Image (cartoon, helix red, strand yellow):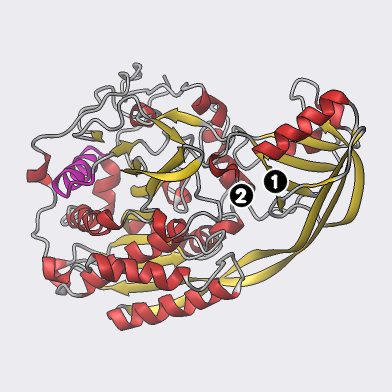
Amino acid sequence: MADPTTTNDDAAPAPGVDRRWFLAAGGATAGALALGGLAACSDDGSDGAKATTTTTTTAAAAAGSGTIRTADVPDQDQIYGWIEKIVEQGVRRPGYDADTWAEGWIEDRFQAIGLDHVRTEPVTVLRWEPSAWSLTATPATGAARQITGFPVPFAAPTDGLELELAAFDPAAPEGVDGKAALVDSPLISIPAGLLATAGSAPKDPTGRTIDPDGTLEGATHLVPFSTSFTEVMEPAIAGGAAAFIGSLVDYPGDSCRYFVPYDGKERPIPGLWISGSDGAWLHEQLATGPVQVKVAVESTAKEHTSHNIIGELPGADDQTVMIGSHHDGPWASAVEDASGTSLVLAQAAYWAAQPRAARPHRLLFILQGGHMSGGAGMLAYIEAHRDELADVVLEVHLEHAALEFAEIDGKVAPTGRPVPRWWFTSRIPPLEAAVSAALTAEGVNRSMLLAPDAFGTQPPTDGAFYHSEGVPIVQFLEAPFYLFDEMDTLDKIDQEHLVPITRAVIRIIDSTAGTSAQAMRAAEVKPSAG
């Protein structure tokens, strides 16, 4: 994740944007997260209060000016049915057949729902596909052992590289020069309520945590990144390593099916993810003597044209509220992001059923391609439409309706709760109040309003750069540990809250009625330099 010293001087160059900068700037340093070291800074520059579990008891009265027409809200079966349909197509990486199918299916759904000007816009992605791989380890004493692994996305292929294995030491990276680097990559765990007061959040956290049952207090949240975020291979590469072996230490379920990095940048050396238990075995063998490994990976990486899928509805005025997500994913990926795609479809279906005068502004629905290729769809849309962004009242991004799972008695099992819900919201007090009120009114608990810079210069979302372009945002994200893993299957979907989340977002969009893009921006509280 991004260095905590990142400032506005490091903003993305205009008019072009660099995908690697996007991924680096999209989050705070994972090291700071791991240490619980993200202090809040209020608008007056003072330190924020400690994260506490609070609720807003009078918020429901402010949860949007209109009445939701319940009959027009898609029901749980409809929204979940869309998720099922997407997932059953198979692995949905950028350029794969299932993602191409999703593009056509979304376009058809937009048209059937009744959106206007339904169209596609091209997005260049890097289509990465592994076809075969293997890892063999031979200790100085003992027989050779085949180790199950998964290729690191976008790492170099190799016919079969035989190398000495060395444990990577950050204090002495040169120790892996010319060798295969065994790199421990545990996911980071943070206090579940930590981010509510991070970044430029106000000193008073009242109303920023909607958790009436107190489930966040004392709880932890295992996020789907190590301290290196997407830079998992870079320290070993800098040390001169000829191959990367990433051990997913203490990963629930002892999995190695981990699709990180997803920045669409090819690496110069091959790499494989292995389970934490296999990594521990390799460390044990290294403690007794040299270990030789043979690494083989067959993969291709080719440019491919994906698409953003866009549709519109006219509203009470010609300024715009955008509602978006992405349609690709690392696997068949129910949560990432069949769920987000379906939440956008639910918004489209609801607002298409309303008369034009009841829509607060022109509504633009977008499902972006290439999230798993460096956020390519978002960057392409901004590049093509930057001149239109000044008239965007609000950009709403919807990602990941997820149930919390954990390793219990040696098995990955549900905890009975949703993953902590992050609502990255521009520091615009009326907007923050509307979001808090909507979540409270609809019982979308375990939610936190986060400042856009709670994770660094911008949110770690598929809509991150809309914030850096100055567009007011409400971006919903849940970050379960399994987000980039093959275990992201239909049982991980938070079915119970698909409709409450949809209703809350309807209220948030409705709350913008009568507010212009210019007035929204003028009300923003700017972060202090303190």
* Percent coordinates x, y for residue 163 in the rendering: 91, 41
- The answer to whether residue 38 is magenta is no
The residue at 89%/27% (across/down) is 289
Which element is circle 1 on? strand
- Other-residue count near label 2 (Cα within 10 Å), few / some / many at <14 / 14–19 / ≥20: many
Q: Quadrant of residue 266?
A: bottom right
* Percent coordinates x, y for residue 193 in the rendering: 34, 30
Q: Which mark is residue 95?
A: none
The residue at 30%/38% (across/down) is 449
Which element is circle 2 on? loop
- Other-residue count near label 1 (Cα within 10 Å), few / some / many at <14 / 14–19 / ≥20: many
Disc on the earlier residue, 1 or 2: 2
Farthest residue, direction top: 46
* Percent coordinates x, y for residue 93 in the rendering: 59, 64
Q: Quadrant of residue 184?
A: top right
Mark 1 and mark 2: span between their CA atoms? 7 Å
* Magenta residues, dominant SS class: helix
Marks 1,2: beta carbons within 8 A: yes
From this view, report whether residue 377 is shown above or below residue 257.
Answer: below
Residue assigned mark 2: 258
Q: Is residue 234 visible?
A: yes
- The answer to whether residue 438 is magenta is yes
Can you say which quadrant of the picture contains the N terminus?
A: top right
Q: Which mark is residue 273?
A: 1
* Amino acid type for the residue under numbered disc 2: Tyr
Q: Which residues are magenta?
A: 428-444
* Percent coordinates x, y for residue 262 in the rendering: 61, 52
